[in-house]
Amino acid sequence: MEKDWWKKSVVYQIYPQSFMDSNGDGIGDLNGIIQKLDYLQNLGVDVLWICPMYASPLVDNGYDISDYYKVNPIFGTNTDMEHLIDEARKRNIKIILDLVVNHCSDQHEWFQKAKADPMCEEADYFYFCSTEDDQEPNNWRSNFGGSVWSRLPDGRWYYHTFAKEQPDLNWECKKLRDKIYEMINWWLEKGIAGFRVDAITFIKKDLSFASKEVPSGERYPVEKLTDYPGIGVFLNEMKKQCFEKYNCMTVAEAPGVDNQAFERYAGKEGYFSMIFDFGWENMEEENDKSSIEAVERWKKKIFQNVSNNSKIGWSAIFLENHDQSRCLNKFLKKEAINFYSASALASIYFFLYGTPFIYQGQEIGMTNVEWKNIEDMDDVRAKRTYQEAVDQGKNPQEVLAYFSELGRDNARTPMQWSDEKNGGFSIGIPWIKCNDNYQVINVEHQIHNPGSLYNYYKRLIKCYHDHADIVKNGAFHTLYENEPGLIAYEREWNGTVLTVAVNFTNQKLAMPYIDQPCILHNYKAVNTSQMQPYEARIYYGRSAEA
Ligand code: GLC
Ligand code: CA
């Protein structure tokens, strides 16, 4: 198999609960994914990233694993998983799984044993401590609100970066690390092609566990607990003992890794094949989204990150994932959302330097939900943050409005396959409600319409594959950086150049002359001197020096 094969691949992310329900219990499952493999092959993607499908009490939707070796019965069986790997392989599609090893579930056998017996081997697999004054051991904050410490009935405290049902694993313990590597290799032997590695920058702790300073005006410390010195020892070990042996693709969720640290993670000798570029993931701070000023600020962030990272490593580039709201809502005002702006957005990111990821439903333009009731929501983070905010006197409607804008459940509503009941996702009652707009936005309508967003994505993917060498090797250069509202860049390699030019505004823009054939665009006609609102063009030809 070609080395670095992932540099020519397009990845499609599946959130199994919400993708396709094959047996009518309202929960998506592995057989549902198998049913949709032809759809995915038709779209043209090379790799599927399947979010956690392991045994789990689902406190954090599967990111709390109680048995790493077992498929959660609500999704099917291990045999179904093998079947999925085989069926995907027949269609030239590879499967990568989520690797969640910063923490496990409090229902995992290891934690249960550790809880029952402080002297057992498994007690070393976690961070336990006792205090004399009944207070938490320090003031560190969990990512889901509250302290990182929770208490067992016998008085011991244990550490959790996320929910209290997700105790952190103690990577200092060699026996534990060996168990993790054994599990990773077991899955690789089953024929999966790699992993998306969850929250990995949290695995190394500051072992002094000293309280952090609280800046004035803040209630809690804001110091980051990620990428702590010494983490590389663990990550290199995991790479050597597992990933390297299989030439597998690894993509890390590595919060807290800045431009300086990028090379250690995703450079030539990096711990992983790539890490997600979170540097331009939203416009959260922009209250004038869709204005030229906001677009210019966003463009700067993209260009800064990609210019830096493309010189030293490889990124995973994305607009959406299961932790974020939908990209159309993130990057556009409601009134500006349409086919042109959606396809413009897709064109902007697809050829940046890295492997493009598509999140389920992004290819048909699924949008956020207006959450009116906290009971409709499922996300543990949303529920706990909501409670904390309301307890502190915040207006519940305001908190819900915040989630309608930024909540993780926006990405977790069922995939919209058709205009039938529940968007064709399930004949039962979906575990989380469908977006009301499934009658308008769905696969069935788009697949047969050549002018649909689905078919635009399909063309983009084809274009990516047709120019695999340039997307893998081509240097990244920004273009016309000072033209407000125009996002343009080129990838140049071996005398050829691929150019992307997108007018990401709702106004017409004067167009600099580009002396190459336009090979893909989202309007019917191409006017060489002017661009329509949200017009996108991809050009390919010989480079000027050639
Ligand atoms: C990652 C996952 C997120 C999960 C968290 C804890 O950030 O993407 O969904 O809640 O890790 O595992
Ligand atoms: Ca099901």
Image (spheres, rainbow, N blue to C red):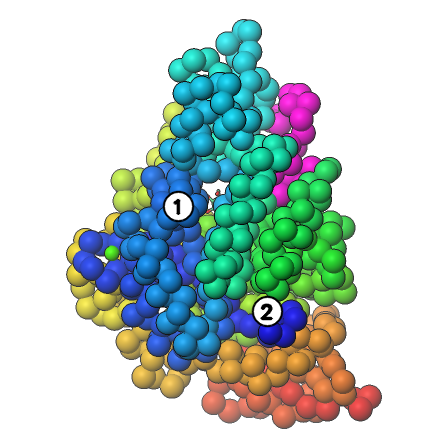
Q: Nearer the viewer, residue 259 or 181?
A: 181
* CA distance separating discs 1 and 2: 26 Å
Question: Where, quadrant-wise, is the N terminus in this rendering?
Answer: bottom right
Q: Does the magenta stretch include residue 451?
A: no
Mark 2 secondary-structure assignment: helix
Residue at x 57%, y 79% (from the top left corner): 464
Residue 10 placement (x, y as % from top left): 53, 71
Q: Does the magenta stretch include residue 208?
A: yes
Give the residue pinned by disc 2.
Answer: 6
Give the residue pinned by disc 1.
Answer: 62
Label 2 near ligand 1 (CB < 8 Å): no
Residue at x 64%, y 69% (from the top left corner): 4
Q: Nearer the viewer, residue 294 or 423?
A: 423
* Amino acid of disc 2: Trp
> Crowdedness of circle 1 by 10 Å Cα count: few (<14), some, many (20+)?
many
Is the stretch drawn in magenta largely helix, strand or loop?
A: loop
